Image (spheres, rainbow, N blue to C red):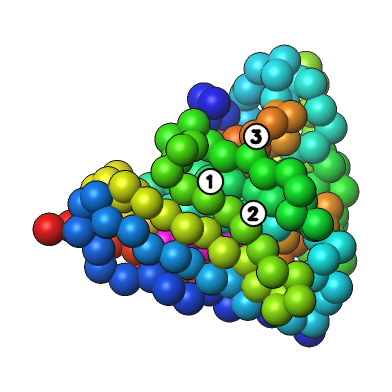
Amino acid sequence: EVQLVESGGGLVQPGGSLRLSCAASGFTFSSHRMHWVRQGPGKGLVWVSRISGDGSDTGYADSVKGRFTISRDNAKNTLYLQMRSLRAEDTAVYYCTRTGGGFDYWGQGTLVTVSS
Amino acid sequence: QSALTQPRSVSGSPGQSVAISCTGTSSDVGGYNYVSWYRQHPGKAPKLMIYDVNKRPSGVPDRFSGSKSGNTASLTISGLQAEDEADYYCCSYAGTYTVFGGGTKLTVL
């Protein structure tokens, strides 16, 4: 059974940093491009970042470029999102999801709250 | 990286059909056959309903269908059921990035 489990969310002050993790199981992790998608309170889904199966190719939404870094450890079957210079507008539930013909599996999400 | 345009809300009675549109540009919806649709119930993670414009994942009923014409994609739900009441999001590959629509709230009357 495919499972994606996010962790690392929490309350952080503006300007602070946080690292999210997504533990994957039930599939060959290195064979799939992975993404982070976020959803602000009461708002829609917003794509954040992607990384190729081998980690060599990454992409970012303009709103996070230069502040967020996506990475993966295929030996640990884990996806990461390093977030720096956090702003109030980064407050959201962050989902990890895999590409397998659309975003076919999603985690349950982890809440990041940026507030003083 | 502008969001795709969806109607804010649609509604229909049980058994009826509804269609949700998703309008983008030639750089996203019109440029690739990689449009997908997601259903999200309150407090839950999104669920893939359609991918690659018109393909249904295993387990998704054939009441759900997708299509595309030019820069506009559509999701059609036939035989509406109470469980279909949810938010629906379209999504398109756009080369260097991916973009979602703003979401459509489907109300089953």
Q: Outermost residue toward the left?
A: A116
Q: Quadrant of residue A28?
A: bottom right
The answer to whether dots 3 and 2 both sit on one chain is no
Mark earlier in primary sequence (2, 1): 2
Amino acid type, callout 1: Val
The magenta stretch spans which residues? Answer: A93-97
**Which residue is disc 3 drawn over?**
B97
Q: Chain of mark 2?
A: A
Q: What numbered label is drawn on residue A35? A: 2
Residue closest to the eye, A78 or B11: A78
Kind of residue indicated by mark 2: His
Image coords of residue A115 (percent x, y): 18, 57
x then y, percent, for residue B85: 53, 58
* Subunit ID for the residue under disc 1: A
Disc assigned to residue A2: none
Quadrant for the C terminus of chain A in the image: bottom left
For the residues bearing labels 3 and 2, Cβ distance under 8 angstroms: no
Q: Residue at x 79, y 21 (%)?
A: B31
Report the residue marked by disc 1.
A48
For the residue labelled by badge 3, is the local secondary structure a helix, a strand or a loop? loop
